[in-house]
């Protein structure tokens, strides 16, 4: 069984990561991926809906920055507007400097402690630290023509990408580019003199969708298995998170003939790696007043790493539910319970008082800090047999939940 499912996993993975070149929200590849998910789930007898949302895609044709007779390597911030400007250069590296700096109609270089982690988008509803809002508010109040962000290598806070874009936000309208902190130090020497920036980028109105595949009775109580189907620009997104989507597709097949008392939803959420989380917001809107009917959310994000075990963690599960989960999962080879983590779609459910189970790789932090969101996140990092084992375990978990009194 595992072997047959593993070869299915292989073909799904290749389809999502290799045949489809990129799954960023709003792109053609993203629509191909959601279409593929819908097609497979329907083939196994699921009723499929694909509620659409508006979003933007983005394209860029390079960026160029000079000051004096020096040239600097810069990249357009994802989802930024383009800009062509020649203006005086202002610099700020602390909140205090940002409050005081004269930056109106200038190019503003931001570096140091205010550029050490990516700023959450202005309209991001799930997690938004006050300090980030403060920095963004000050940037807007200073009214620079453009922002140049110099960011450091910071795998703990910024992940595997270096330099990382300080701003990745289609709702923030001051054009921006980013560079390494070494380039930033070189550029800072030109403070007060003229710099010239040319960044060719544009926002493109587009659309995307979640895919919600349902099975089972119309009983309101249901189990929601989800995985985010989108990926950042420029990554095949194999572990993050074609792997999770593949588990859902294997589960669709395993549940083909099964009609229990609990409703089942397999959801390809579309937006975990996109600045505005449109799929997550759309799911909450569609389920307003019905989140309380969800007996359990199971979120799959980056399972199946070649090395190490599969890791599961529980969030807000009442005792009977928790022991049903542990009773099913704890004895299985290669599955271990570990610490809670919060940077995934299960939090969308947990924040709405829905009990959740998150499944990832034991080496999650290593993935986050070395390959996630880069070109290195390729299918050869994924163990197909581990994905098959997770799908089999989740089928058994569903059967155990069916037997729970109260469900
Ligand atoms: Zn992910």
Image (cartoon, grey):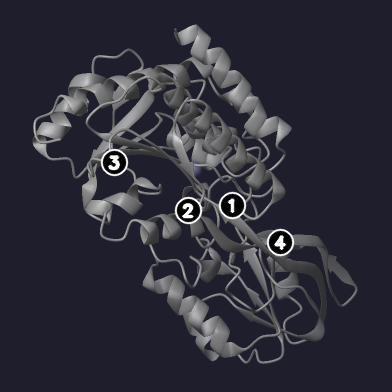
Q: Secondary structure at mark 3?
A: loop
User: Could you tell which of marks 3 and 1 lies nearer the N-terminus?
Assistant: 1
Q: Secondary structure at mark 1?
A: loop
User: CB atoms at circles 3 and 1 under 8 Å apart?
Assistant: no
User: CB atoms at circles 1 and 2 under 8 Å apart?
Assistant: no
Residue ID at (31%, 31%): 312
Residue located beneath label 2 in the image = 157
User: CB atoms at circles 4 and 2 under 8 Å apart?
Assistant: no
Residue located beneath label 3 in the image = 340
Residue located beneath label 4 in the image = 58
What is the x, y in percent for residue 121? 51, 68
User: Could you tell which of marks 4 and 2 lies nearer the N-terminus?
Assistant: 4
Q: In front: 225, or 100?
A: 225
Spatial separation of the CA atoms under disc 3 and disc 1? 26 Å
Q: Quadrant of residue 318?
A: top left
Q: Quadrant of residue 170?
A: bottom right
Asked if the residue at label 4 sits under 8 Å from ligand 1, the reply is no
Spatial separation of the CA atoms under disc 4 and disc 2? 25 Å
Residue ID at (70%, 37%): 20
Q: Is residue 97 visible?
A: no
Mark 4 or mark 1, whichever is nearer to me: 4
- Per the rendering, the mark at residue 153 is 1
Q: Is residue 185 left or right of residue 46?
A: right
């Amino acid at each position: 069984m595992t072997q047959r499912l593993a070869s299915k996993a292989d073909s799904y993975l290749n389809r999502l990561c290799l045949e489809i070149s990129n799954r960023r929200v709003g792109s053609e590849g993203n629509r191909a991926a959601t279409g593929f998910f819908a097609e497979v789930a329907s083939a196994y007898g699921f009723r499929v809906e694909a509620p659409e949302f508006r979003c933007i895609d983005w394209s860029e044709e390079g960026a160029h920055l000079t000051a004096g007779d020096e040239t600097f390597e810069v990249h357009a911030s994802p989802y930024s507007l383009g800009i062509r400007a020649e203006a005086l250069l202002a610099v700020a590296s602390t909140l205090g400097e940002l409050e005081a700096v004269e930056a109106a109609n200038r190019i503003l270089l931001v570096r140091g402690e205010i550029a050490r982690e990516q700023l959450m988008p202005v309209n991001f509803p799930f997690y938004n630290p006050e300090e980030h809002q403060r920095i963004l508010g000050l940037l807007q109040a200073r009214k620079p023509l453009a922002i140049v962000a110099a960011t450091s290598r910071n795998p703990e806070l910024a992940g595997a990408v270096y330099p990382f874009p300080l701003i990745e936000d289609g709702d923030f309208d001051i054009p921006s580019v980013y560079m390494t902190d070494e380039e930033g130090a070189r550029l800072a020497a030109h403070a007060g003199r003229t710099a010239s920036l040319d960044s060719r980028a544009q926002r493109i109105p587009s659309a995307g969708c979640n895919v919600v595949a349902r099975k089972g009775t119309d009983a309101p109580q249901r189990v929601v298995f989800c995985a985010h189907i989108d990926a950042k620009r420029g990554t095949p997104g194999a572990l993050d998170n074609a792997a999770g989507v593949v588990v859902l597709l294997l589960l669709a097949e395993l549940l083909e003939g099964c009609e229990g008392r609990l409703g089942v939803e397999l959801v390809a959420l579309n937006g975990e790696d996109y600045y505005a989380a449109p799929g997550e917001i759309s799911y909450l809107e569609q389920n307003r007043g019905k989140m309380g009917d969800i007996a359990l959310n199971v979120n799959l994000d980056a399972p199946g790493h070649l090395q190490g075990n599969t890791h599961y963690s529980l969030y807000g599960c009442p005792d009977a539910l928790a022991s049903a989960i542990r009773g099913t999962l704890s004895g299985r080879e290669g599955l271990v319970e570990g610490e809670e983590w919060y940077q995934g779609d299960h939090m969308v459910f947990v924040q709405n008082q829905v009990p959740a189970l998150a499944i990832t790789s034991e080496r999650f932090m290593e993935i986050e800090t070395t390959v996630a969101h880069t070109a290195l996140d390729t299918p050869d990092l994924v163990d197909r047999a581990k994905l098959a084992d997770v799908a089999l375990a989740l089928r058994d978990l569903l059967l155990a939940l069916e037997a729970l009194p109260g469900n």
